Image (cartoon, grey):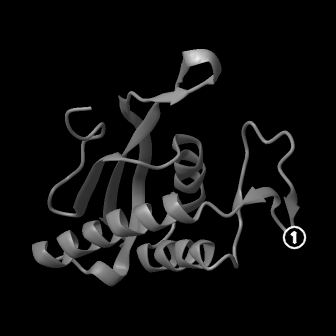
Amino acid sequence: MVGYTAEADPDTTSKAIAKELPISPKFSREICRMIRGKKVDDAIRMLEEVVELRRPVPIRRYNYGVAHKSGVGPGRFPKKAAAAIIKVLQSAKSNAEYKGLDADNMRVRIVSAHLGRTIPGYMPRAHGRSTAWDQQTVNIEVILEEVQ
């Protein structure tokens, strides 16, 4: 991933991107789905509640065996991914303030998680063998826009 995947008007939007974060791609996608379209302060507050284990993230795909949470359905608390996405949202909010936009009146227009580079690794096994134990990374992209 070289840059942003979506075009945005630079006069009314602010952007931020984080590359090759060592977080779960699945949880990143589910968090992005949860906060898309929300106001920035609400999205940050929601993710802080996820980190504090007070708000579960709904798991919509590949949720066989995922325990149900009250009012959500199948859900989990991906603290590491939520903390990483909070930093990207705060960066986009700071970029909006720097550009002179009203940072308190912004909403999350685009938030997406794409697979980054895979870091190869191995896990030793019995009898001198090994198994591939690669680590996936994620690229997070956020575009905020002013609300009329």
**Residue found at x 44% / y 43%:** 113
Nearer to the camera, 11 or 119:
119
**Residue found at x 45% / y 36%:** 135
57 left or right of 93 in image: right
Nearer to the camera, 74 or 79:
79
15 left or right of 46 in image: left
69 left or right of 77 in image: right
114 lies above or below 10: above
Q: Amino acid at mark 1?
A: Ser
x then y, percent, for residue 143: 32, 56
Can I make out residue 92 in this image? yes
x then y, percent, for residue 146: 31, 69
Nearer to the camera, 11 or 32:
32
The quadrant in which residue 51 appears is bottom right
28 lies above or below 14: above
x then y, percent, for residue 20: 32, 43
The quadrant in which residue 119 appears is top left
39 lies above or below 117: below
Kind of element beneath mark 1:
loop
Of the 4 image quadrants, the one containing the C terminus is bottom left
**Residue found at x 26% / y 68%:** 91
**Residue found at x 70% / y 79%:** 54
30 lies above or below 61: below
